[in-house]
């Protein structure tokens, strides 16, 4: 699946209740940047049921405008854009002025031999209310994937359209789209690289809830780990229960000279988690083998 640097690209800009002025500024920067690259491109704006709708003629730059009649969510908006994209490479960014869209050229240059290039935001640019849970979440995802992930859910990136198609049924309707495709790519041997970018203060009010969405992201990462790399979840849990069982056994033996019921239960849980992980890993390997053969 790994290919040369993109020669054409479809940029998708999801839009929900964004200022028309900010949207015009965003697409203008994208247009100027890609026009300088001298490559074939298109800009797809997907209006996700915004309260104040707008028409294509109100956007100063030639774009393909798609409207959702109701708000369907960030992931659904991106999937609509991907389904309507005519090029094999996809770029995504937000319409709210937070990402340095003039750096799309650098992301494209980094894509030689890659399946996805992610714009990794600098930690200093992220507010402290989001920095702590994001750091914990990113560290957790890095452990589960076995690779360093500077930015799990950056909304500015480029990737092969085939990559999205491969994980299409797993890609959610909400903000977890980017986290899902990142973990999916990293745990399935795709070539992924990160390029450091700045992250600007959002123009307007964010719809992300730091507490609720962090819980959702943790749940998502764990679920994806169970799907893509189950041993990373089950084996550590097995080891924890084994350690507890050993400590309890030592305590029981010192006090009563034999192993108690709780010690045996802890040993049982340890073996259960180990064998659950073994079975899940066999299923995962079989699934990947079958999918791999279909793609040959």
Image (spheres, grey):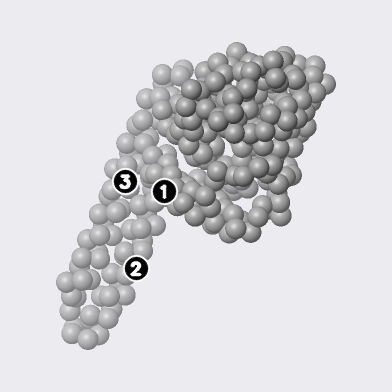
Callout 1: SS: helix
Q: Label 1: few (<14), some or many (≥20) within 10 Å?
A: few
Q: Position of residue 40 (x, y in %)?
A: 72, 14
The answer to whether residue 32 is seen in the rendering is yes
Q: CA distance from mark 1 to mark 2?
A: 25 Å
Residue 145 falls left or right of residue 226: right
Q: Position of residue 178 (x, y in %)?
A: 54, 37
Residue bearing mark 3: 278
Q: Residue furthest right?
A: 36
Residue bearing mark 2: 243
| Mark 2 or 3, nearer chain start | 2
The tag on residue 291 is none
Q: Which mark's residue is nearer the viewer, 1 or 2?
A: 1
- In depth, the one of 195 and 255 nearer the eye is 195
- In the picture shown, does residue 134 fall above or below 160? below
- In depth, the one of 44 and 259 nearer the eye is 44
| Mark 1 or 2, nearer chain start | 1
At 59% across and 33% down in the image, what residue appears? 17
The tag on residue 219 is 1
Q: Position of residue 204 (x, y in %)?
A: 66, 42
């Amino acid at each position: 699946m790994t290919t040369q640097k993109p020669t054409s690209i479809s940029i998708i800009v999801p839009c929900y209740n964004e200022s028309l002025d900010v949207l015009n500024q965003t697409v203008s920067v994208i247009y100027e940047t890609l026009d300088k690259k001298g490559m074939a491109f298109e800009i797809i704006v997907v209006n996700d049921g915004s309260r104040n709708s707008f028409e294509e003629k109100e956007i100063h730059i030639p774009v393909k405008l798609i409207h959702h009649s109701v708000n369907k969510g960030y992931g659904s908006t991106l999937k609509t854009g991907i389904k309507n994209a005519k090029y094999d490479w996809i770029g995504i960014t937000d319409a709210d002025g937070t990402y340095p869209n003039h750096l799309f050229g650098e992301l494209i240059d980094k894509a030689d031999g890659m399946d996805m290039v992610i714009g990794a935001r600098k930690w200093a640019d992220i507010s402290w209310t989001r920095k702590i849970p994001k750091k914990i979440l990113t560290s957790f995802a890095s452990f589960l994937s076995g690779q360093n992930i500077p930015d799990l859910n950056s909304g500015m990136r480029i990737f092969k359209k085939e990559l999205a198609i491969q994980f299409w049924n797993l890609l959610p309707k909400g903000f977890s789209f980017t986290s899902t495709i990142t973990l999916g790519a990293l745990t399935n041997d795709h070539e992924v690289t990160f390029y450091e970018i700045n992250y600007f203060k959002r123009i307007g009010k964010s719809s992300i809830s730091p507490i609720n969405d962090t819980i959702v992201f943790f749940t998502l990462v764990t679920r994806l780990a169970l799907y893509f790399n189950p041993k990373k979840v089950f084996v550590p849990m097995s080891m924890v229960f084994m350690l507890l069982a050993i400590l309890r056994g030592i305590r029981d033996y010192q006090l009563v000279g034999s192993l108690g019921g709780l010690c045996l239960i802890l040993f049982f849980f340890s073996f259960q988690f180990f064998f659950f992980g073994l079975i899940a890993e066999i299923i995962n390997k079989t699934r990947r083998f079958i999918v791999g053969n279909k793609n040959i």
